[in-house]
């Protein structure tokens, strides 16, 4: 019996994902738990494991790298013997004019179908895995095809992108099955035309854009800044570096994350979340770290920071940052944080206005540590100083509590030893 391999839901709000590629070849023996393919969802690329034992069979019309696929789309099968025949990917024993009982369509397409009284079970989807698009709901598609028999086939996404870029998609050689023009074909053609230079939006870039707009729409952001004397912090880190093996020493970000947890324990509302029922305070202090990667900004989460010694914290952040930059961080590693730290000091940035990572209350921006003149007693001496920028949601806390939190954090930065040595 052939067991279908489908696109899983990696997040509670996931509707579709980007197929990365197969990790096994057609006909390979597989066991439960073997990674079968990679899938990109929101900000994570994950290996999807199989559930059944047998032999992997990849249909000839299966997806290719970069294809956007709806959750539940059948992309392959696990069969008992290599010679076993494959059913249709749409669910029946062979392709027929009748679509699956539960058609694959987005919520907006289902809403449009209800408005026009269209039974989606009687509509043949032209998207990946039989997914139904808004274009598939247009009346009399057959008559239109008869009017233009010479016109090549294209996906709805390809036609939409072609309209956006002002490209005649009928002149493009398609890379899909039977010459079907796909979205990536149109974008490739668009990028090759003088004056267009369109950079395709990756799923991660789209997610970042969505979350940033969500932050601005749903929060009342206010930013406070202060300058802290980081001389003792710099000296303490040098001691750790001298006692450790170079890269194993805690980074300045590790110190700030540890000290931010100290301040959050004293001012828990800065780690709260806004809800219609009230302000939710989380049971643990889990802090996200903004990581710059080739794919875009990712925020893996260090859990239970107060329970970690500084060296344990440093090891954990190195692991998370490494996985983020190599595309191996899981979606679960970027959920559940109550506060975020973003350090741009390595790029020579003194101060900036960080954007809140919803549903968190606040985010801390850390600038570079640099020697600047400071008044000590009656004299002016060079001291290492750092600018801390706190953006907080004014719905959750007022300026006074936020200022006291930042004051506590600055004091911890100026005298870090009692809080990080354990």
Image: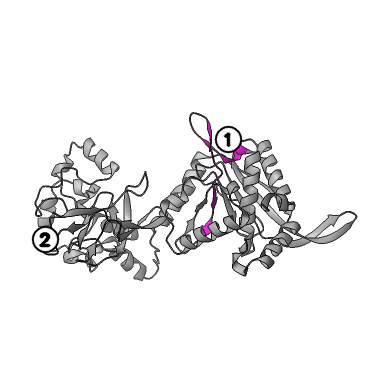
Is residue 253 on the magenta stretch?
A: no
Q: Is residue 193 visible?
A: no
**Farthest residue in the right direction?**
378
Relative to residue 78, is residue 188 depicted above or below? below
| Secondary structure beneath label 2 | loop
Start and end of the magenta stretch?
A: 268-293
Which quadrant: the N terminus? bottom left
**Sequence-earlier tag: 1 or 2:** 2
| Secondary structure beneath label 1 | loop
Is residue 285 on the magenta stretch?
A: yes
Q: Position of residue 191 (x, y in %)?
A: 36, 68
Quarter of image, res 314 = bottom right
Residue with the mark numbered 1: 396
Q: How many marks?
A: 2
Gap between marks 1 and 2, in whole Å? Answer: 60 Å
Residue with the mark numbered 2: 84
Tell us which disc is closer to us: 1 or 2: 2
Viewer-proximal residue, 183 or 234? Answer: 234
Q: Position of residue 344 (x, y in %)?
A: 60, 59
The numbered dot on residue 16 is none
Q: Position of residue 142 (x, y in %)?
A: 11, 52
Quarter of image, res 26 = bottom left
Q: Is residue 118 visible?
A: yes
């Amino acid at each position: 019996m052939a067991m279908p391999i489908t696109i899983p839901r990696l997040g509670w709000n996931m509707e579709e994902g980007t197929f990365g590629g197969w990790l096994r070849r057609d006909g390979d023996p597989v066991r439960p738990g073997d990674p079968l393919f990679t899938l990109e969802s929101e900000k994570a690329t994950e290996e999807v494991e199989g559930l059944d034992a047998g032999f992997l069979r990849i249909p000839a019309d299966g997806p290719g790298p970069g294809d956007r696929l709806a959750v539940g789309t059948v992309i392959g099968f696990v069969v008992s013997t290599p010679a076993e025949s494959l059913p249709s990917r749409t669910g029946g024993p062979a392709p027929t004019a009748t679509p699956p009982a539960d058609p694959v369509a987005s919520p907006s397409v289902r809403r449009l179908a209800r408005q026009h009284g269209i039974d989606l079970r009687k509509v043949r989807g032209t998207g990946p895995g039989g997914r139904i698009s808004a274009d598939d709901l247009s009346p009399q598609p057959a008559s239109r095809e008869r009017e233009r028999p010479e016109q090549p086939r294209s996906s709805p996404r390809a036609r939409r992108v072609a309209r956006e870029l002002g490209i005649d998609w009928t002149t493009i050689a398609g890379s899909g099955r039977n010459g079907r023009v796909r979205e990536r074909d149109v974008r490739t053609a668009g990028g090759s035309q003088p004056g267009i230079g369109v950079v395709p939006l990756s799923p991660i870039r789209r997610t970042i854009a969505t979350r940033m707009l969500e932050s601005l729409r749903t929060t009342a952001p206010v930013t406070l800044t202060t300058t802290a004397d980081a001389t003792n912090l710099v000296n303490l880190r040098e001691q750790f570096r001298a006692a450790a093996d170079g890269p194993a020493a805690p980074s300045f970000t590790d110190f700030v994350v540890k000290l931010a947890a100290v301040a959050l324990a004293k001012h828990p509302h800065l780690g709260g979340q806004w809800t219609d029922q009230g302000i939710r305070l989380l049971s643990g202090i889990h802090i996200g770290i903004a990581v710059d990667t080739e794919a875009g900004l990712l925020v893996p989460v260090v859990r239970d920071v107060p329970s970690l010694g500084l060296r344990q914290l440093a090891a954990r952040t190195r692991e998370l940052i490494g996985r983020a930059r190599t595309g191996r961080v899981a979606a679960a590693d970027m959920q559940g944080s109550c506060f975020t730290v973003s350090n741009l000091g390595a790029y020579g940035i003194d101060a900036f206005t960080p954007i809140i990572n919803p549903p968190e209350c606040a985010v801390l921006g850390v600038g570079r540590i640099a020697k600047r003149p400071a008044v000590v007693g009656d004299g002016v001496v060079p001291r290492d100083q750092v600018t801390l920028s706190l953006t907080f949601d004014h719905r959750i806390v007022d300026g006074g509590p936020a200022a006291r939190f930042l004051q506590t954090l600055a004091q911890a930065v100026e005298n870090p030893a009692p809080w990080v040595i354990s």
